[in-house]
Each structure stands twice: as structure tokens, then as C-alpha cells.
Image (tube, coloured by chain):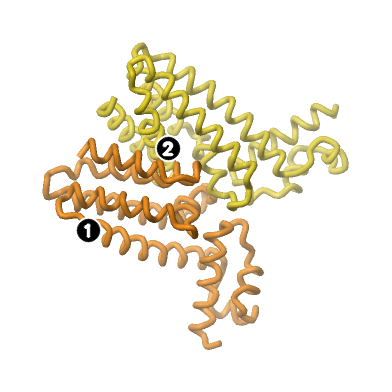
Chain colours: A yellow, B orange
Amino acid sequence: MKKNEVRQALVDTASRLFYTQGYNNTGINQIIEESGVVKSTMYQNIKSKEELLLIYLQTAGEQTNEALEAAAAKGKTPKQKVLAVFDYLEELVKRKDYYGCQFLNIVSEMPRDARQVRKQIKKQKDGVRALFARILEPIDKADLADEIYTLFEGALIANKVHGDAWPVVTARNIVNKII
Amino acid sequence: MKKNEVRQALVDTASRLFYTQGYNNTGINQIIEESGVVKSTMYQNIKSKEELLLIYLQTAGEQTNEALEAAAAKGKTPKQKVLAVFDYLEELVKRKDYYGCQFLNIVSEMPRDARQVRKQIKKQKDGVRALFARILEPIDKADLADEIYTLFEGALIANKVHGDAWPVVTARNIVNKII
């Protein structure tokens, strides 16, 4: 494997394992084994499991932002744009390979002193708040952005608890009432 | 230590460690060491780390239910009772020793096949939905219970992400609008 292939193999394997079995459940040895990378070459490419976690969150963050922007673009009015984001969430949580929001999964695993990871997750979620504020600004309702965001998070975590899409539908109903 | 003291020491230590550092971050050896229990006596009292987790969730569940009932009892009208639950949440998340909802912390750590644990967490949260339904039934608004519940979860998980009480205040504002 070339240097960039080694790095990519490590990132891909770590990302899959962190998502499906959790960060603390995943040992660095499992990542090395399943990525097919020679152990001694790993540390030339990646410093630690935490570095892989930060790359995972960064990549998942970019993909999520793109998906949310694309979903919002389907609506015509600001209200329709916000509702379109919740339609996307409903579709997302029904996917067979979906097992919760990557960022909420990780934040619950982190001890209080995992500052860098917690900071990155907060930044990602601040981006969602900003997206709703941007959508609602033209109708002078940007002050609702954090309410919509709190519903967004409620939908995702209650879906995780109940293993069902009803919390997303419920959150969408409230959004429909308050905008 | 007597038999019931051994069991209690294990449960207390495990509960503290599961809450402050997470379930997967806590090894059975750390629980034994910090509880001061002799290793060979442990397995006469507790079968596994998962058994300790189920006891932890059960105990935390009973305490949470009592606290939520007590909070609701402070309100006179159904609407005031629901708002009083959110006032309690605001107070709760501001405590120095608070580090997220016990049940949401654990659910995010669990792999898909941890059926018994996930079932117990779902049961706990179904109790919260039922509490809101009971409160709202006299004014014929029990159909709002799941909306209130989704806001309850959104408040708790967004507090975890942002390390701030504003999501609870935001959720309370929505509750105030929709009842």
C-alpha cells in the first residue's frame, strides 16, 4: 500500500467500526487488523485512535452538512425548506444501515475531559443551528432556529431510544406549528 | 463485608463509574478494585458487568421517575405541571455533578444487539411519555404527550452537546407555545 492508501484504509476501517460498535468498544488492534495495514506502518500515518476519531467526525460532518443543504434546497419557501430537512431525517432514520447520529453517538461516550472531540461535535451542531437561522432569516424568523434545532436533536435521539421513525414525524409536526 | 454489603458496594461503585466515565470505558476489574470487594466473592453476588448495568439503569429509573413526579406536582394546572418538569430539568442540568441523562448516555454506547439494555431504556422513556399523557389527559391534550417528550429529549441531548442550559429553556418555550 502507498502512504495515502494506508491512511485511507485506517480511516475507512475506523469510521465503520466507530459507527457500528462505538468508539470505546473499538480497539486500535482491531482497526489495524481489519484495515489490512502493517502495524509498524500505521504510526507513520496516524498518531492515535483519537486522531482517527477526529477525522471520522470531520468527514461525517462534511457529508452531513451537504446532505442537509441538499434536503433544504428541495423546499421553495423557508418553512418548506425546514420541513424538507425533517423529511430527509425521516428517510435517513429508516435506512437499514442507520444506527443513530454519528455525533450524538460519540458525545455520549466521551468523558468530560475529551475537550477536542467535544469541541468538534459542538462545532458541527452549531453549523446546524446556523443553517436553520440562514433559512429562516428572509422571513425574519431566525430567532426560531434554536427551537427547530432542539427538535432536530430530539427527533434523532428519541429515534435511537425507540428504534422507530415516529419521533421524527412528531418533531416535524411541531415545526409545522411553530414556523 | 456481608453478602448484601458486597452487592451494594459493587452496585454503588459500578453506578458511579458508568455515569462518570461510561460503560465501555469501565472494566470489571476497576469496579472490583474501587469497591473494595474480594474478587472471588464478586461472582457469588453478581453474574456480569451487564447485570450491574441493568441494576444501575433500574435504580436510576426509579429515582428519575420520583423526581419527575415531584416536579410535576409543583404545578397546579396540567400546563403548569408540564412546565414545572422543564423547570426541574433546567435546575438538574446546571448541577456540577450532572453529566447528561443516564439513559441517553448508555443507549448511545450500546451495540444494536444489546437487546435487554435497550429494552430497559426504552421502557424508562415510555414511562416519561406516559407521565406527560397522564398530566395532559384532564384537558383532553394527551395527544401532545409525544411532542412534549420529543422536546424533553431534545433538551437533554442538546445540553450534553453544548454544555449549557439554553436548550432546556428553548424547549420550555416551545412547550409553552404548543399546550
Judging by the rendered image, the residue that carries numbered circle 2 is: A153
Of residues A179 and A100, the one nearer the viewer is A179
Of residues B114 and B139, the one nearer the viewer is B139
What's the chain of the residue with tag 2?
A
Mark 2 vs mark 1, CA separation in Å: 28 Å
Image-quadrant location for residue B74: bottom left
Dot 1: within a 10 Å radius of its alpha carbon, few (fewer than 14), some, or many (20 or more) residues?
some
Above or below, B3 against A58 in this view is below
Q: Quadrant of the N terminus of chain B?
A: bottom right
Q: Residue furthest top?
A: A76
Q: Residue at (22%, 36%) from the top-left corner?
A: B178
Judging by the rendered image, the residue that carries numbered circle 1 is: B74
Q: Are marks 2 and 1 on the same chain?
A: no
Q: Residue at (48%, 83%) from the top-left corner?
A: B4
Q: Position of residue B64 (x, y in %)?
A: 36, 61
Above or below, A161 against A5 in this view is below
Query: Relative to A26, is A177 on the left or the right?
Result: left
Q: Position of residue B133 (x, y in %)?
A: 21, 49
Query: Relative to B64, is A46 on the left or the right?
Result: right
Name which residue type carries label 2. Answer: Glu
Q: Position of residue B55 (x, y in %)?
A: 46, 67
Q: Residue at (65%, 35%) from the top-left corner?
A: A56
Q: Which mark is residue B50?
A: none
Of residues B15 and A140, the one nearer the viewer is A140
Q: Residue at (29%, 39%) from the top-left corner?
A: B173
Which element type, helix, strand or loop, lies under badge 1?
loop
Dot 2: within a 10 Å radius of its alpha carbon, few (fewer than 14), some, or many (20 or more) residues?
many
Name which residue type carries label 1. Answer: Lys
User: Mark 2 or mark 1: which is in front?
Assistant: 1
Number of numbered discs on residues: 2
Query: Relative to A18, is A152 on the left or the right?
Result: left
